[in-house]
Amino acid sequence: MHSPGPLLISSVSPRTATKVLHTVATAKNGSRTVLSSHPLASFAQRQTQASPYRLFTTTAQQRIKEVFPPPPDSPSIKVTPPAWHHPVYTEEQMNAIQVAHRETKNWADRVAFMAVRLLRWGMDTATGYTHDKASVKPKGDPNPAALSQNKGWFAMSERKWLVRALFLESVAGVPGMVAASVRHLHSLRRLKRDNGWIETLLEEAYNERMHLLTFMKMAEPGRFMKFMILGAQGVFYNGFFLSYLISPRICHRFVGFLEEEAVITYTRMIADIDAGRLPKWEKLEAPEIAIRYWNMPEGHRTMRDLLLYIRADEAKHREVNHTLGNLEQETDPNPFVSEYEDPSRPHPSKSIENIKPTGWDRKEVM
């Protein structure tokens, strides 16, 4: 089945289309039609080919290239499997994910929450995003009829959602890697074990990067976007690194609040699809990289299904970081990889069968 054409095709005027037709040479080379060097001619040719890799992009169409080419000079390697295999999510579990917010209980929580609100305001302003605040309740999904009613610059489209997702995921992969590296070096300096935290933090960073690679199969950032990502990563990485050295607890609470916002964002994307406001995504199939990573079953490989998987991942990161923020940072073991005396009793795990949106309290797991 062919995927829909790129979003850019809607912007081609009749005059431009005429120019494209005039650039197509009439000469034949075997069974192929030879096109001129005009970039729009290449664009027209690609529209007739099957399944383009990216359906929406901020980059000029003629500059699109394959982001994941095969490794050079490695004919004996067939495939490189992922380092961490993703747990299996059921459709019932993913549909049960809800928007939730952990109430602030002390000054540290308030610092983390205000930092997230400031970051959210900056990102919303930069990406032209807004929403009806009354459309999302803490214990339920938003009402699809109340979403994306904004006009002009603030109206959300498929392209603007992808731009937002690309920027979001390029930042979301930083905290897990920073926290893991700091704890790794801390373990080496103190000649002590880390009690299993490093592995979970690295897996979180890896998962967020897979989100980014999936969206890059659908949209290639332009030069300005790449510059924005570079600047944001430089500032955020160093800021988070220094903050984690000062207070790991506040940093994990910050990430927990940040993941709450991510769950809201993907919930609204799903609701917009259900409301018919993103028609190009209604029958769009998920990229192959996503199908393999999440082991998406036949018949459940649409863009909406992909967003359900990503939202479930963000909800898991929300639970993990709120839980880690409740623990003693230097002594408590990681409850998400520990074995329990009574396995039948609900406890934290790598999957989402016992997920707690606001995290597990220390007394519940220790």
Image (cartoon, rainbow, N blue to C red):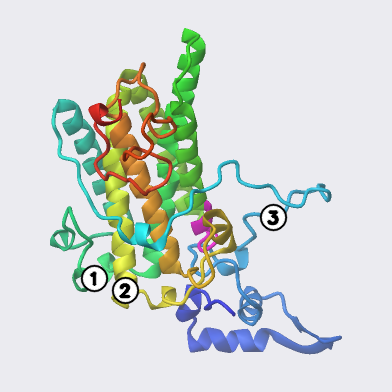
Q: Residue at x 14, y 27 (%)?
A: 107
Quadrant in which the C terminus appears:
top left
Looking at the image, residue 160 sits to the left or right of residue 203; the answer is left
Q: Amino acid at mark 3?
A: Pro
Residue 97, position as x, y percentages in the image: 30, 55
Q: Do the residues bearing badges 2 and 1 touch, measured as CB atoms within 8 Å?
A: yes
Q: Amino acid at mark 1?
A: Pro
Lower position in the chain sequence, tag 3 or tag 1: 3
Q: Which residue is at the front of the view, 47 or 4?
A: 4
**Foreground tag (2 vs 3):** 2
Question: Picture coordinates of residue 266 (x, y %)?
Answer: 33, 58
Q: Describe the element under mark 2 as helix, strand or loop.
A: helix
Label 2 – label 1 distance at C-alpha = 7 Å
> Is residue 266 something one can see in this rendering?
yes
Answer few, some or many: residues within 10 Å of disc 3's Cα (few below 14, many 20 plus, some between 14 and 19). few
Q: Residue tagged by mark 1?
A: 144
The residue range painted magenta reads 213-220
Extreme right residue here?
30
Nearer to us in this view, 320 or 33 = 320
> Residue at image x 64%, y 59%?
66
* Residue placed under numbered mark 3 in the picture: 69
Q: Amino acid at mark 2?
A: Asp
Residue wearing tag 2 = 274
What is the C-alpha distance between the residues marked 2 and 3? 34 Å
Does the segment drawn in magenta span residue 2?
A: no
